[in-house]
């Protein structure tokens, strides 16, 4: 069952939240999409906010899935051993945990509030098994593309504990900075080609948050709880708002929480098949051959 409760009672206070002045053309909502219910892995029920028929990708972002349930049958089958090549997977947990194990020997348990930025590069084979805590499982997985010249680099993990993610406490809200910079705080994720911004924003009613996003980056807001206004337009829980170009973005609190993502577009051809994201069909066929032949993860 989805939990889309509005978080806060009413209040009215205007906050000037950004230390940077928001300059340039303001970003607005250019398109709005409802997340699509689907299943993936060995039968995990999830909401696909990006990467569905209506919105295949938003360069450089390829997919965003949300797992949010209190029914173990929705996720217990998990994502048993599967490969990736040519892009990055980002797992962000709110409740519950994700146990992972891979072909390189990494093994761990992502806790509530933690993030994992995994650069699959030339190849990784791993399993991801969701676990509930206190009856709840709530997390996200984002797929981020790699540029053509970097698709076959060695795999890299950035495992980020909850306390490593800077939190900016606002008078009527909170911003967690997973990647990029906001309010002078820089997130712990480093060395990512598309120079991403990944914020987890909670705003109470009446809060107003002024952010400056890099001009030229594609950006979207996915509201995960309650509602929020972006560029003057209301976006409700389970909706993904594609933002127009520009720099300044104003978010207004309606009692809700959202993920804000921005990244430099690659402007390259995309060939994708299941867990492989390359530039050409021939490279996809090579990835499948390598996987079947046991060569996917070899340098
Ligand atoms: Fe995976």
Image (cartoon, rainbow, N blue to C red):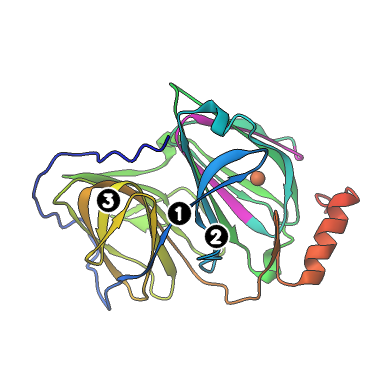
Does 246 sit above or below residue 256? Answer: below
Q: Earlier in the sequence, mark 2 or mark 3?
A: 2
Q: Percent from the top left, x then y, of residue 11?
A: 9, 45
Q: How many marks?
A: 3
Instruction: Say which of marks 2 and 3 sits in front.
Output: 2
Per the image, label 1 sits on a secondary structure element best described as loop
Query: Contact (CB < 8 A) between labels 1 and 2?
Result: yes
Where does the magenta region start and end?
88-104
Q: Percent from the top left, x then y, of residue 186?
A: 39, 52
Query: Contact (CB < 8 A) between labels 2 and 3?
Result: no
Q: Residues within 10 Å of mark 3 (few under 14, many from 20)?
A: many
- What residue does disc 1 label? 35
Q: Which label sits on residue 227?
A: 3
- What residue does disc 2 label? 52
Q: Nearer the viewer, residue 5 or 218?
A: 5
Q: Percent from the top left, x then y, of residue 93?
A: 47, 38
**Residue at image point 55% right, 64% down:** 53
Per the image, label 3 sits on a secondary structure element best described as strand
Ligand 1 within 8 Å of disc 1? The answer is no
Does 11 sit above or below residue 266? Answer: above
Disc 1 from disc 2: Cα separation:
8 Å
Q: Earlier in the sequence, mark 1 or mark 3?
A: 1
Q: Residues within 10 Å of mark 1 (few under 14, many from 20)?
A: many
**Residue at image point 82% right, 52% down:** 296
Asked if residue 295 can be seen in this view, the reply is no
Q: Is 99 inside the magenta-drawn segment? A: yes
Disc 1 from disc 3: Cα separation:
14 Å
Where on the picture, by quarter, is residue 91? top right
């Amino acid at each position: 069952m989805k939990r889309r409760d509005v978080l806060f009672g009413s209040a009215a206070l205007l906050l000037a939240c950004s230390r940077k002045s928001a300059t340039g053309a303001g970003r607005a909502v250019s398109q709005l999409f409802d997340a699509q219910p689907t299943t993936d892995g060995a039968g995990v029920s999830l909401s696909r906010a990006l990467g569905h028929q209506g919105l295949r990708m938003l360069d450089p972002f390829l997919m965003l899935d949300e797992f949010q349930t209190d029914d173990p049958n929705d996720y217990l089958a998990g994502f048993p051993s599967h490969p990736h090549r040519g892009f990055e997977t980002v797992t962000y947990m709110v409740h519950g945990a994700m146990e992972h194990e891979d072909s390189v020997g990494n093994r761990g348990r992502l806790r509530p509030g933690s993030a994992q930025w995994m650069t699959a590069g030339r190849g990784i084979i791993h399993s991801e098994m969701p676990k509930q805590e206190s009856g709840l499982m709530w997390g996200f997985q984002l797929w981020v593309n790699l540029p053509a010249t970097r698709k076959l680099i060695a795999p890299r993990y950035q495992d980020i504990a909850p306390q490593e993610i800077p939190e900016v406490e606002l008078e009527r809200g909170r911003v967690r900075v997973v990647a990029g910079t906001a309010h002078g705080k820089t997130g712990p994720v480093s060395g990512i080609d598309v120079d991403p911004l990944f914020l987890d924003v909670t705003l109470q009613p009446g809060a107003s948050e002024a952010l400056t996003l890099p001009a030229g980056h594609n950006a979207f807001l996915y509201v995960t709880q309650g509602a929020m206004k972006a560029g003057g337009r209301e976006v409700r829980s389970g909706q993904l708002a594609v933002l127009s170009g520009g720099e300044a973005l104003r978010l207004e609190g309606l009692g809700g929480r959202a993920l804000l993502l921005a990244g430099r577009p690659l402007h390259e051809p995309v060939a994708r098949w299941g867990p492989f994201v390359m530039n050409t069909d021939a490279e996809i066929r090579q990835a499948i051959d390598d996987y079947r032949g046991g060569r996917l993860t070899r340098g």
